[in-house]
Amino acid sequence: MTNDEFAHRCIHETLSGVREGLSRFSGPSRVAIIYALKPGDHLSIIDPQNLLRGYELKLSSFYNVVNSFFCEGDECKTGKLYENIQPQNDPQLDGIICQGGNSATFFYQMWFTDHHPNLCSILPTKYWLRHAILRLSHDLQNGPALYTGISGEFLREYASHAIRECLADIALDVFGLDLSPYISPILETILGVSRTNEEGHRPFGILTFINPREMTRVRFLSRFAGPDLPQLGNYKHVRKLLQSVEKSGNSLISDGTSILGVAHPPSDCFDLSAEYLGRQGFLSVAGELICSFRDGRYSSSTFKAKLFEVEEALLDFNFSSDQNHDIFCIVAALVREAEDCAFGCSIVVDLAPEPEILAGQSLETPIDLRDPKNLDLAIALAKVDGALHIKADLKLYGFACLLDGLRVPEEDRARGARYNSALRFTAHHPESIIIVVSSDTAVSVFLQGRVLYKNFPCELYADCQIAGIPLSSWLKSE
């Protein structure tokens, strides 16, 4: 195996690992890399899912492809070891997260991935890409004889590590605290408690970790005493104690080892807070949201649909911007409540000049959903099996509606009745938009017998090219 063949094998396995890991962490994610192995090499690109298509002009300007390679000034001075990574300037592409570096063993690499609209924070993703740079430099330094092939597998499961590195750096850079040894056990505790039921119920409440050196600044409402303080490793005990702070705005306070009491933490110290909201929760550091967690895994999602697809679908209809805005706000309110309360529902927005008559419970007098009280009623009715029927006049005409339709090729047997019924109905009623919220809070938008995707369908990231192509050729092939 030549050096170039080995390098491309490493790139391929690393890229596959990053892509699959980020897809688990953030939802379906594309990943691309622009790189040069050695000084003087032409820049090459691997972009198997066309993540960077549409950015050709910016990339051409940024990299100035008439040159044989790109690297900014003194930043190209390499160190002697693979871990001496010199950061590289970010191309600043809208909707893309980038991270680049240069080392003694890998002259230039810039990684790219999707910036999903519902991320809690881009920081863990940037740490993920930064570690990919480090792993590639390490593998190239070891060479084929010592190559273990572990980098791709490690990057597939990098979520907790990315969060740990992110939190440790915030603690050190902002507060001057070296908390690296303590963060991993805390992250394990957060997930352990999230999986622990109490009388059949998932946890609610806030668990806050404060550096022991700053504990004297905490004004406890109630501080526990005695030698047998509740230990973090006892998830069942911590879960029981969380009941004391449910929906109170207060927190259980921990020093990273024990539960010390109940307080409202001070705002100007380093604190790591896990807010439990039943099946899911959110992790913040010093008031900054970092990530979420659900079903024993960390995630980047806010679990709040942005509904860009609804906005774009409404533009296809001949309505005023004010009417589009009102329709969107009504749909968003219904979806938000379904997400917060974790119930499934379907919403039919019937925009035909002569609206359909749906089988279900019709209303004698349609109710205007611009009235907040009526909207609250619609939210309650959405919990009943069947769909809400909303027309272009912003009124609710029925609930518990059945969505009829003939079978369509795009049906997915792995999805539920709401999903496939929406596909069938919109295929035969092209002037209807259907929004389906599943009980796990996933949101799908349907129009004309298809699901609307903001980014790309999942099947587009099944394979990954191994060899790169010259960036200059890629730019000309748009």
Image (cartoon, grey):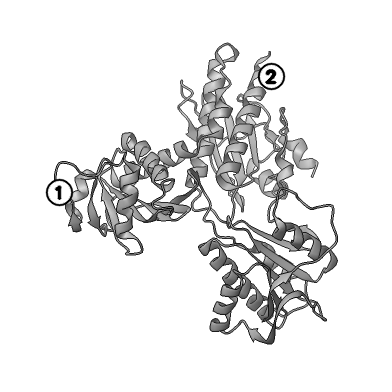
Residue type indicated by callout 1: Ala
Residue 20 % position (x, y): 61, 37
Residue furthest left as drawn: 226
Q: Is residue 90 left or right of residue 399?
A: left
Q: Nearer the viewer, residue 19 or 8?
A: 19
Residue 41 % position (x, y): 66, 26
Residue furthest bottom as drawn: 365
Q: What is the secondary structure assignment of the residue under circle 2?
A: helix
**Visible in this render: residue 210?**
yes
Give the quarter of the figure containing the C terminus: top right
Residue 15 % position (x, y): 62, 33
Q: Is residue 326 above or below residue 183?
A: below
Q: Residues within 10 Å of mark 2 (few under 14, many from 20)?
A: few
Residue type indicated by callout 2: Glu
Q: Residues within 10 Å of mark 1 (few under 14, many from 20)?
A: few
Per the image, the residue denoted by label 1 is 225
Q: Residue at x 70, y 45 (%)?
A: 458
Q: Evaluate if marks 1 and 2 touch, with contact meaning CB atoms under 8 Å apart.
A: no
Q: Is residue 454 above or below residue 89?
A: below
Q: Is residue 320 above or below residue 52?
A: below
Foreground mark, 1 or 2, reads 1
Disc with the residue nearer the chain's start (1 vs 2): 2
Tag count? 2
Q: Nearer the viewer, residue 53 or 423?
A: 423
Per the image, the residue denoted by label 2 is 5
As measured in the structure, the alpha-carbon distance from the residue carrying label 1 to the one carrying label 2 is: 63 Å
Residue 1 % position (x, y): 68, 13
Q: Which mark is residue 118?
A: none
Q: What is the secondary structure assignment of the residue under circle 1?
A: loop
